[in-house]
Image (cartoon, helix red, strand yellow):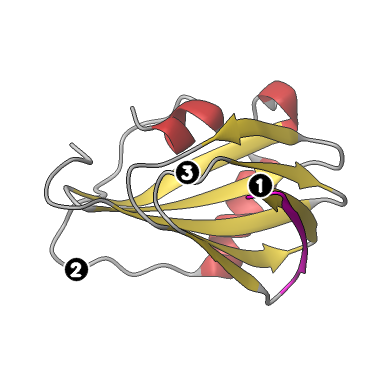
Amino acid sequence: MNPLEDTAAGAQRTPEPTGSPLLSFDFGAELERLRTEDHPWQAGRNARTLVKYPNLRIVLIGLRPGAHLVEHQAAGPVSIHVMAGHLLVRAAGQAFDLQKGQLLSIEAQVPHDVEALAESAALITIAWPGDEGR
């Protein structure tokens, strides 16, 4: 499990294909699925890995207000695209106030933490150099 999957672990569910050559998603349906999934949200969050290739992960994460992803870092660059809500991301001594439609990129190995200021959803993309993401 990679640091984000570890940090944002959500429901235990039946595995779905995440590494197929072609994958397509309906974000409205995926967000609703995260929001209504029948399980207790540990620490106010739920996540689903949508894409899992050796050098790329795309994770959809839902966060309840006040949920916090403790400081962590990734081996490759990360992008955080806010799909709904309002997030506060702290990285490199700066605070980024992100709302729906905004995107933040973070270079590899930069420690960062995330706090939900409202019910939120974000699409997290992580790229690894070579095949380090395995």
Label 3 SS = strand
Tell me which residue sits at (48%, 38%) in the image: 73
Q: Which residue is mark 3?
A: 48
Residue 70, x across and y down, in percent: 65, 30
Q: Is residue 72 magenta?
A: no
Q: Is residue 74 left or right of residue 99?
A: left
Label drawn at residue 82: none
Q: Looking at the image, is 130 positioned above or below residue 65? A: below
Dot 3: few (<14), some (14–19), or many (≥20) neighbours within 10 Å? many
Q: In this orientation, which residue lies closer to the viewer: 13 or 54? A: 54
Q: Quadrant of residue 112?
A: top right
Tell me which residue sits at (78%, 53%) in the image: 88
Which SS type dominates the magenta stretch? strand
Q: Residue furthest front?
A: 93
Q: Looking at the image, is 92 positioned above or below residue 79? A: above
Among the two numbered marks 3 and 1 on one chain, the one whose residue lies closer to the N terminus: 3
Q: Which residue is mark 2?
A: 22
Q: Which residue is mark 1?
A: 62
Q: Is residue 93 magenta?
A: yes
Mark 1 belongs to which amino acid?
Gly
Q: Is residue 10 among what the camera can see?
A: no
> How far apart are the two marked residues, 2 and 3, measured between alpha carbons?
17 Å
